[in-house]
């Protein structure tokens, strides 16, 4: 099982469509909790989780409920999850993370990444919207630091990959990375 997580509007649906050819977009009705959507891909199950974090028109308690449901789903299925793909918006992620830090809060993307690490779920961070990014290397280096990892992008090439779901950039590389990580993950678990 591969789970896709990310804030609302980072391009998760676009990416899943690009990878699988399947359209997962649901109606965007604020306040309506969306359930995880499962679809088949190359003999695997892809799970598209609802977007978390701020969504305009969605009250805070509903956002919290969505987050709790995602966390619960991942915890309950941890032994079946081969890989998590955390999709972030490369253009705005850093700015949002820094805004949360200034308020003394743990940024939700950072929290999710660390949560996945604690559960030992292999994770790929798909840094989307690279077409809108100015300095990709510097941004990814900074993100790595914010995510609590040591070293630079060169040390984490199998985790952080810049892509553009909209324009199709680097998607072949992402596909390869997904397959490699799944293989390694299954070997480690003796499957
Ligand atoms: N510039 C740019 N825009 C993108 C890219 N990928 C997605 N988008 C745009 O970002 C917006 C949100 O994309 P979605 O795929 O709907 O995002 P989502 O994460 O599924 O959003 P939710 O349904 O709220 O969870 C759309 O307008 C997309 O066209 C990209 O690589 N570059």
Image (cartoon, grey):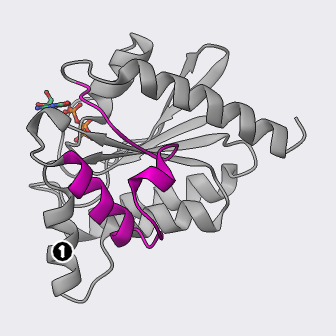
Camera sees residue 128? yes
Q: Is residue 78 left or right of residue 161?
A: right
- Look at the image and tell me in which quarter the C terminus lies: top right
In this view of the protein, can residue 25 be seen by the observer? no
Q: Residue at x 67, y 34 (%)?
A: 182
Is 149 inside the magenta-drawn segment? yes
Magenta stretch: includes residue 31: no
What residue span does the magenta drawing correspond to?
Answer: 136-165
- Crowd tier of the residue under label 1, counting other residues whose Cα lies within 10 Å: few below 14, some 14–19, many 20 or above: some
Q: What residue is rendered at 34% in x and 71% in y?
A: 146
Q: Image height check: is 14 above or below 121?
A: above
Q: Which residue is mark 1?
A: 98
Q: Is mark 1 within 8 Å of ligand 1?
A: no
Q: Find residue 124 and report its horizontal and vertical position in percent.
A: 49, 44
Asked which secondary structure carries label 1, the reply is: helix
Residue 3: percent from the left, percent from the top?
53, 40
């Amino acid at each position: 099982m591969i789970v896709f997580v990310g804030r609302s509007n980072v391009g998760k649906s676009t990416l899943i469509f690009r990878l699988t050819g399947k359209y997962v977009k649901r109606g965007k009705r604020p306040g309506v909790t969306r359930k995880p959507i499962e679809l088949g891909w190359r003999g695997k199950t892809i799970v598209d989780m609802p977007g978390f974090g701020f969504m305009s028109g969605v009250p805070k308690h509903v956002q919290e409920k969505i987050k709790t449901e995602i966390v619960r789903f991942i915890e309950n299925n941890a032994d079946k999850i081969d890989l998590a793909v955390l999709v972030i918006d490369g253009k705005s992620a850093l700015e949002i993370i820094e805004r949360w830090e200034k308020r003394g809060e743990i940024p939700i993307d950072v929290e999710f990444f660390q949560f996945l690490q604690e559960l030992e779920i292999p994770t790929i961070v798909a840094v989307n919207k690279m077409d809108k990014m100015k300095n990709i290397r510097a941004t990814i280096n900074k993100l790595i630091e914010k995510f609590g990892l040591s070293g630079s992008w060169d040390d984490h090439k199998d985790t952080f990959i810049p892509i553009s779901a909209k324009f199709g950039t680097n998607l072949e590389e992402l596909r390869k990375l997904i397959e490699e990580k799944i293989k390694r993950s299954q070997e480690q678990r003796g499957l």
